[in-house]
Amino acid sequence: MKNKILFLFMVLFFFIGINNSFSASKIFIKVKIDNEIITNHDILKESKYLKLINPDLLKLNENEILNISKNSLINQIIKKKEIEKFLDLEKKHPLIETVLEDLYKGSNFKNLDDFENNLNYENNYTIKEIKKKLQIELYWNELIYTKYKNSININEENLLKKIKEKKDKNKIEFLLSEIFFSNQKNISLDEQIIQIQKSIENKGFNNTANIYSLSQSSKYGGKIGWVDQGNLSKTIFIELNKIKVGEYTNPIKVGNNYLILKIEDKRTTKISINEEKQLKEMINFETNRQLNQFSNIYFNKAKINYSIDEI
């Protein structure tokens, strides 16, 4: 159950080379995080990796891509440092091969060899290096689960009530993408929302998620996947019913944060519900949703304890 939750947690919200001529170019430090550094070489390499697994990034200009890549590396280093306080990061995680397979298949590569060939062509990360990156995300999810599992609040009675209400009725599913953000200190909420909405209109929803979203799904353009209406809160379901496929919601308040959802597609099917199976799915979905919130809270608290100097 624990491994399944960790894997789903990573998928729900989880889921960013360098050419030969670069070796002759000047390498300089871009960011210092305590005793670790990020160079322009590192950022360029990360950008090539991110574009490989999320081609939508190619619609952004190079400076925007490099900024996303820089932030991705900063987040990775902070997560690694936090993990090392509690867990052995060098120990192979039991889900690493499964997550690697999910990564390359989700990025439309036929198999591992096809993925590796594309990495080699771009002089990008090696498979070993990518496994290290995935290992950090897996152990981060495990750390969050360990710290907050007793804080997860699931009302099974309410979930069962939802199941019985829709039993043997049409099931509605939404293919969703998200932008999950918090109000910044140096800008009003209204100004921030206008900024995000302008970006959506000019750059597209998925690229805006890459730039602004705090969720781990941002690496994949905010793509969540198919979500059963039964797994959605009443507030979110009402907001989704106000819009059509291809449109996005107004910001929805979620705790101290905000969520904008886009309906990529929608389908309705007639089903006969297996209550036990449906309950397990709903428990997993709600568990992962709460873990995602705890992850953002913990990361933001941890981040202020590190000296981050951008040069």
Image (cartoon, helix red, strand yellow):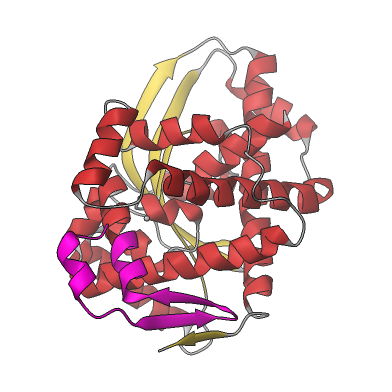
Toward the viewer: 102 or 218? 102
Residue extending farthest top: 272
Residue 17 relative to residue 181: left or right: left
Say if 243 sits above or below 107 in the image: below
Total marks shown come to: 0
Toward the viewer: 254 or 219? 219
The quadrant in which the N terminus is found is: top right
Q: Position of residue 176 (x, y in %)?
A: 39, 43
Toward the viewer: 43 or 59? 43
Q: Position of residue 248 (x, y in %)?
A: 34, 54
Residue at x-position 28% and y-position 66%: 44
Say if 127 sits above or below 184 in the image: above
Residue at x-position 77% and y-position 32%: 156
- As for residue 6 lying within the magenta part, the answer is no
Say if 28 sits above or below 68 in the image: below
Q: Is residue 111 visible?
A: yes
The quadrant in which the C terminus is found is: bottom left
- As for residue 38 lying within the magenta part, the answer is yes
Q: Position of residue 34 (x, y in %)?
A: 60, 81
Q: Which residues are magenta?
A: 17-46
Residue 235 relative to residue 294: left or right: left
Residue extending farthest front: 24
Residue 49 relative to residue 291: left or right: left
The picture quadrant where one finds residue 63 is: bottom left
Say if 8 sits above or below 191 in the image: above
Residue at x-position 34% and y-position 48%: 243
